Image (cartoon, helix red, strand yellow):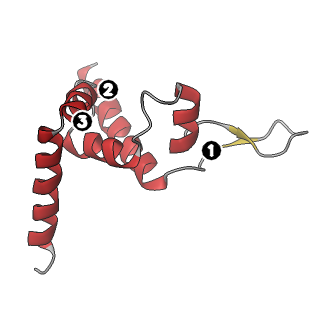
Amino acid sequence: MAGVGSLRDLNDDLDRHIRLSLSWLEKDNLLKSVLGVGKVVSSSLLIELPEPGMLNRRKIAALVGVAPLNQQRHHARETYGMGRAKLRAGLYMAARQVKGELNDQH
């Protein structure tokens, strides 16, 4: 399989960069402390959303595309979906996983 080794190499390089940067390592550890956030989601957030700490939660939500946006000024119709689609999809899958685990506990 062509590409599998290169993907593994990229993941290894990313892990190495995270471990070598105290700032990224702290953020990675903090992110992984959240239920549902593992290596993939944490890495995605670090790569795709370097703004945490620089922007407020509303602006971050808008960047990811999970904040409601008023499409037309005179209508109350709100939509979601602008922003960083790949990151939003990863967060959605992590949230679904957590929801399933929590439902199984009850």
Give SS at disc 1. Answer: loop
Q: Looking at the image, which is closer to me, 23 or 2?
A: 23
N-term-proximal mark, 3 vs 2: 3
Disc 2 marks a residue whose amino acid type is Asn
Which residue appears at 35% of the width and 42% of the height? 45
- Residue beneath disc 3: 24
Q: Where is residue 18 in the image (x, y as percent from the top left)?
A: 17, 42
- Residue beneath disc 1: 80
Which residue appears at 84% of the width and 45% of the height? 72
- Marks 3/2: CA–CA distance: 33 Å
Which residue appears at 78% of the width and 40% of the height? 77
Which quarter of the image is occupied by the N terminus?
bottom left
Disc 3 marks a residue whose amino acid type is Trp
Number of numbered discs overlaid on the protein picture: 3
Circle 2 Cα neighbour tier, 10 Å, few/some/many (<14 / 14–19 / ≥20)? few
- Residue beneath disc 2: 103
